[in-house]
Image: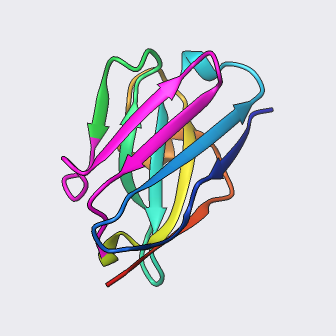
Amino acid sequence: QVQLVESGGGLVQAGGSLRLSCSASGHGFSSYAMGWFRQAPGKEREFVAAIAWSGGLTNYADSVKGRFTISRDNAKNTVYLQMNSLKPEDTAVYYCAEGSTAQPMVDQYKYDYWGQGTQVTVSS
């Protein structure tokens, strides 16, 4: 059984930065893609970023390209999301997820395991 635990969320002013971490326990972390998703109040969960098993391929939502960077450390079973130039519209609960394949996917239904989420609030 895979368990994912996010950390690093908090309150930040617009233009600031946060770094989210997601630690994984259980088998297979280094074999699968990892993704970050977010859900704002009253909205559906949406894709943010994903990274392939090796870290060599990434995928980003248009809304975060150039501001967010996803990375992973397979030796530490951890995936990161560096968020810069944050905007109030980035406010949401952020979830990490482990994919069912090795390649970074946008479709949330291609992810098998999910963390409990961490709140990110960006004030204007």
User: Which x, y percent locates residue 12?
Assistant: 44, 71
Give the residue displayed 24% in from the left and 51% down from the top: 67
User: Which x, y percent locates residue 109?
Assistant: 49, 46
Q: Is residue 15 rendered to the left or right of residue 50? A: left
Q: Is residue 105 visible?
A: no
**Which image quadrant for residue 105?**
top left
Q: Is residue 61 magenta?
A: yes
Give the residue displayed 69% in from the left and 33% down from the top: 24
Quarter of the image with the N terminus is top right
Q: Nearer the viewer, residue 13 or 116?
A: 13
Magenta-tinted stretch: 60-87
Q: Nearer the viewer, residue 45 or 20?
A: 20
Q: Is residue 60 rendered to the left or right of residue 70? A: left
User: Which x, y percent locates residue 108?
Assistant: 46, 48
Q: Is residue 83 rendered to the left or right of residue 112? A: left
Give the residue displayed 35% in from the left and 43% down from the top: 106
Q: Is residue 58 magenta?
A: no
Quarter of the image with the C terminus is bottom left
**Compared to 75, does 122 lie above or below?**
below
